[in-house]
Amino acid sequence: MKQYLIIILLFLPVLFWAQGAENAIPGDPFFEDEAEYSDSLKYGMGGVIGAITVDGVTYSQVRMRPEINIGKFGFGLDIDLLINPDGSIRKEDWDDWRDYVNKIFFIRFAQKRDPLFFKVGCIPDYTLGHGLIFDHYSNMLRYPAEKNVGTYFGINTPLSGAGFEVYTHNVHRNEILAGRVHVNPLYYTKAPLLEKFKVGFNVGMDRNQYGKYPDRDGDGIVDVYDKFPNNSSYYLDTDNDGIPDDLDTDISGIGGLDHPDENPYVDQQFPGIATSYPNFQFNTGIAKDTAQEYPNWKKLTVYSVDYTLPLIDNDAFYLDHYGEYAAIDKYGSGIVFPGFSSKFFIFEAKLEFRNFTDQFIPGYFDRLYEEQRSEVMITTNATGGNHYSLTTKEDFLVNAKSSLGWLGYLRANLFDLVFLKVAFQDMYGDQMNTGKSLWSSLTANPRNILNLKEAGVFYSQTNVPYIDFVNFRNNQSHISGRLVYGLSQGANLVGRYSEIYTDINGDGKIKGKDEVQSSFSFGVEFQL
């Protein structure tokens, strides 16, 4: 009942404010850059009515997104109701006080160039320095199945351009953190261009790389493979019969009794049975599951220092030079030098030379990090059963070999009708087994052509031995699409689809629903 009351209270005032709302299409939460604000008064209500698939279950969806922008201040909510096939509301979205905090889509003030700025809520794109630590990191990768209320806060002073900013991906958990301090050391020289020379010092960390998977009962066994996630006394159930292995006389579920030498619980239930009935046909060679415990957090920290020097700065052409050095604590390091970025005509471009030592991955906290920070591994144990464990992105650092090469980026805006983004990384090394990356997106805004307002697709492969154009669904790739069709002045039919892949069995192929995490939504978005 609470959620209905909240919607009513929010919806009524917004109806009165809606007269000044823009006829804008709600932004894609995954790949759209954060919008610029104007110093005008704006009120609006967006929303979705349709269907969405979360964790393999299709729900009816009613979502309201009221938004207020007054000058540099903005505030938005995300009030959603996911209705099960049986007509009940998805309780996981309303059973904890944190769920109500998570209804905040964003609270923001100003931009990063202003004296004071901050944002709280969904942060789809966060970069630190020139990207050797945080490179377009998103705290919305698993949205809406998982909502992170993140925040960044910063200050810029007139004292030699000194300032700082801090970041967390989730204010409830504070696991993925970042910080930056910057200064213009030559500011008081007033020398042309040199006074804008900026130096920054950065740090990023993941305090708990296993944090992707909750452990509700605190037994050190993550819920994703804990068969009894609400009972800390048990976690294994090899035959999936609902009876813990520790209390099961037939662990493998093949019928009969297990031999007491392999299953001590049988002897507890039937003391001395193996001695009393030596010829009994006990189950032997039992294939029992095992699981790795993770009672402690596992931390990883990355440091960097960067600089930027404007070379040409006018309305027709902008060009700057930059560099950055980064080191992963207890592992390797990397450097970007030289680097150049430019804006001219319809293009934005950058090109940089990269040189990395062994055990270093650039942009460690990238757009897919929320998914890749840890993954479930299923292998065969000594008994022939399954062994469940986690592997982290850190585990791949030991196999990263020294390399050098180029990274380039090009964005083109053709009359605000077509937007093309392409980025590549091409690294070389004697023993390097990763280092090739491709990011691409194509978005068309045909305006009123057949009422089609937007069609876009995004695809990436990151840190792979080679760009695989044949098997485009692989462990390091991500694809998503968005289609917007205008129904009326204030309503659009919107479809979104996203796939993230995890090679659980390690066979190098993506197949089956367990290895494809898909998200689909289709419905009507509206602006009042």
Image (tube, grey):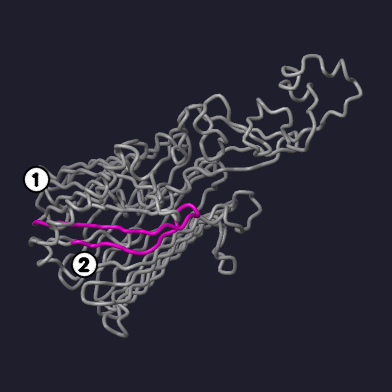
Residue 323 visible from this viewpoint: yes
Q: Is residue 452 left or right of residue 237?
A: left
Where residue 13 appears, as percent x and y from the top left, is 12, 56
Q: Residue at x 13, y 51 (%)?
A: 114
Q: Residue at x 36, y 40 (%)?
A: 176
Q: Is residue 140 left or right of residue 401?
A: left
Q: Secondary structure at mark 1?
A: loop
Q: How many marks?
A: 2
Where residue 288 appears, as percent x and y from the top left, is 71, 33
**Residue closest to the eye, 190 or 410:** 410
**Residue closest to the eye, 337 or 259:** 259
Q: Is residue 278 left or right of residue 57?
A: right
Quick one: label 1, few (<14), some, or many (20+) residues within 10 Å? few
Magenta: main secondary structure equals strand
Q: Quadrant of residue 291?
A: top right
Where residue 374 appears, as percent x and y from the top left, is 50, 42
Q: Amino acid at mark 1?
A: Pro
Q: Which residues are magenta?
A: 45-70
Q: Residue at x 12, y 48 (%)?
A: 187
Residue indicated by mark 2: 527
